[in-house]
Amino acid sequence: MIDLLLIDADSMPVRHRSIILRRSLKDGIETLFVADRTLKDVEEARSAHTASLREPLRPSLSKEELRKIRSWIHMLTVESADGAADDKIVELARPGALVISHDMPLLERVIAKGAMALDDRGNVWDEGNIRERLSARSTNMALREMGVFDERTRRFDMKDIEGFANSLDSILIKNAE
């Protein structure tokens, strides 16, 4: 069962964050966005969700009790040091967590800790296929350094965004039991 979403939010596209936020709110899954800066859209969603949780209870609870009611969406801002967000995500990764990132070495590290891994194009990664992808990545990097190969990352299109949303839905539905 997935009970935590850990998002490598430093370079996660806004459209993807929106999809994740909607799904988190729908399913009530604790969601932690980790980045080296505060993300306005995440903070706004967290604040609005907290207010919506508190509003119906205002007449019956004290201000102190209301303050204890908070959104399950969180924003964790880490220092701007290289790899700080990745290291925090690895520290928090565990079985029952789904980590979302486009950083393959990060995904390899969280898979080793028992977390599930999803990239920003909707690919689900496990111990077998992540090693294969990292090997191809190393080969391509060596070829680029020799000037033989110049791989360019394809821009996101609607098919990628839809694939990501469908994969996220599929994982959460499959692991809801």
Image: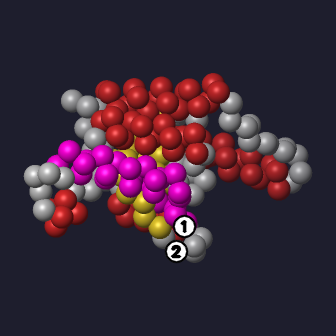
What label sits on residue 36 in the rendered view?
1
Left or right? Give the position of 58 relative to 114: left
Find the magenta span and give its range. Answer: 32-57
Mark 2, secondary structure of its residue: loop
**Residue drawn at (31%, 27%) of the image:** 174
Q: Is residue 68 above or below residue 56?
A: below
Q: Is residue 78 above or below residue 30?
A: below
Q: Amino acid at mark 1?
A: Asp
Residue 126 seen in the figure: no
**Residue drawn at (54%, 40%) of the image:** 16
Residues packed near mark 1 inside 10 Å, few (<14), some (14 to 19) or many (20 plus): some
Quarter of the picture holding the C terminus: top left
In space, the residues marked 2 and 1 are separated at their CA atoms by 6 Å
Residue 156 found in image quarter = top right
Mark 1, secondary structure of its residue: loop
Q: Is residue 35 above or below residue 125?
A: below
For disc 2, the marked residue is: 79
Task: Judge by depth and name the residue closer to the eye, 54 or 32.
Answer: 54
Q: Main secondary structure of the magenta part?
A: helix
